[in-house]
Image: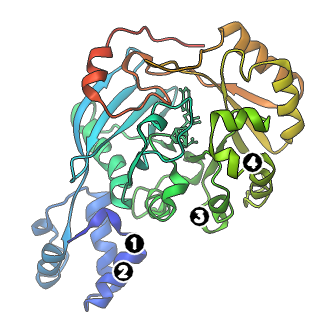
Amino acid sequence: MKNIFDFTLDDLTVFMVEHGFSQFSAKQVFDWVYKKTNFNIDEWTNISKKCREFLKESIEFYLPKVIWDALSKDGTRKFLVQMKDNHTVETVVIASRDRLTQCISSQVGCAIGCTFCHTGTQGFTRHLTAGEIAGQYMAITLWLRNNVHPDERMSNIVFMGQGEPLHNYENVKKATTNFLNDRAFGLSQRKVTLSTSGLVPKIKMLHDFPPVNIAISLHSAIDDNRTELMPINKVYDLKRLFEAIKEIPLKAHRRITYEYLLIDSFNDRKEDIEALSNLLKIKESKINLIPFNEYPGSKYKKPSAKKVLWFMDQMCQRGYTCTVRATKGDDILAACGQLKTQYEQLNTWDNQIEVSRV
Ligand code: SAH
Ligand code: SF4
């Protein structure tokens, strides 16, 4: 049986027409599912009985199940969601000023194996389906409505949970299509961000992807050092990466975000600043500095707050738009790179680490 959350509106239209129903019936189904969040087909009374019987026989409404949740002192919520085959992934909801951002996972584990990343250390298990990716947003929306406030709504999505989204290109594309479709989740393009470690062949396919914000995990502008952090740089080095980035279609006023993890005495030195400013074009780039999040067994260290501010200041002086990502949800190991599917371990870590902000 097909999962409703695997269908884009176009897919469902084709499916309904193939089975002898009208194009309009697909829109009606989408309205019940996404606008009214009513998954009880018997109550879809504006749809013919025959059509409802067909839907009952051919479509299921499977959403990932929230099996664990934790609330950090700074308001970050972390969830462990379980798929049908019992695999789990984490998803995090981060509150900041007027935004409520969901950090979504695209795979169980990750094949890229970055040496600084908690997820990277668990290897790759499988891709998530489009329905499991979009289903994280629906499942958490419903959870927040039931447990926080009936009007609670997440405004932004970042593909910065577990997995490399471009490695799972087709499913991430389908889920993103539903995130942006007004008949489905209806988020604005500017509120969805895809982050990639630099999978060059897939970056070259972004002209065929819904026009969301793109973030590139750069982390070093020096090839040898980037390779040490990200094995993908052996194949897709900085030269190939930036040739591909040039091809990303950007609407006039938009820029690429470069995520730059700051690791103590590794990539936070003067020569790193020089290399970074030689590599990035000021007008086309935004830099997001991310102080390294330490986790049990991590081999790198977080730089001091003073060092982080110095690095940012140096880039600002050179004309770059530069922000520092506040470390959110540290006390529940929900911060970036700390997502690892072992919730027994997470439970024991709960409350042990103070939330730190840079
Ligand atoms: N795989 C994609 C998206 C998920 S990772 C990518 O790598 O871009 C999301 C972000 O978390 C990336 O910028 C990644 O570099 C960052 N991250 C991973 N491990 C981290 C750690 N230990 N501390 C801080 N950020 C980390
Ligand atoms: Fe995968 Fe991103 Fe972690 Fe690298 S940083 S191992 S690409 S999830």
In the picture, measured across the screen, residue 196 lies left or right of residue 15, that is right
In the picture, measured across the screen, residue 313 lies left or right of residue 155, that is right
Number of residues whose C-alpha sits closer than 10 Å to that of mark 2, classed few (under 14), some (14–19) or many (20 or more): many
Mark 1 / mark 3, whichever is N-terminal: 1
| Quarter assignment of residue 52 | bottom left
Q: Nearer the viewer, residue 114 or 314?
A: 114
Residue on which disc 3 sits: 209
In front of the other: label 4 or label 2?
4
Residue type marked 4: Asp
Real-space Cα separation, disc 1 to disc 3, in angstroms: 16 Å
Mark 3 / mark 4, whichever is N-terminal: 3
Q: Position of residue 87 (x, y in %)?
A: 27, 46
**As drawn, 304 above or below 35:** above
In the picture, measured across the screen, residue 65 lies left or right of residue 218, that is left
Q: Secondary structure at mark 4?
A: loop
Q: Residue at x 88, y 27 (%)?
A: 274
Residue type marked 1: Leu
Q: Residue at x 77, y 46 (%)?
A: 238
Q: Secondary structure at mark 2?
A: helix
* Labelled disc at residue 304: none
Residue on which disc 1 sits: 9
Mark 1 / mark 4, whichever is N-terminal: 1
Q: How is the image coloured?
A: rainbow
Residue on which disc 4 sits: 237
| Quarter assignment of residue 77 | top left
Q: Position of residue 85 (x, y in %)?
A: 22, 53
**As drawn, 332 above or below 3:** above
Tell me whether the residue at label 1 lies in contact with that at label 3, contact meaning CB atoms closer than 8 angstroms: no
Is residue 259 visible in this depiction of the protein? no
Number of residues whose C-alpha sits closer than 10 Å to that of mark 1, classed few (under 14), some (14–19) or many (20 or more): many
* Labelled disc at residue 13: 2
Q: Nearer the viewer, residue 27 or 168?
A: 168
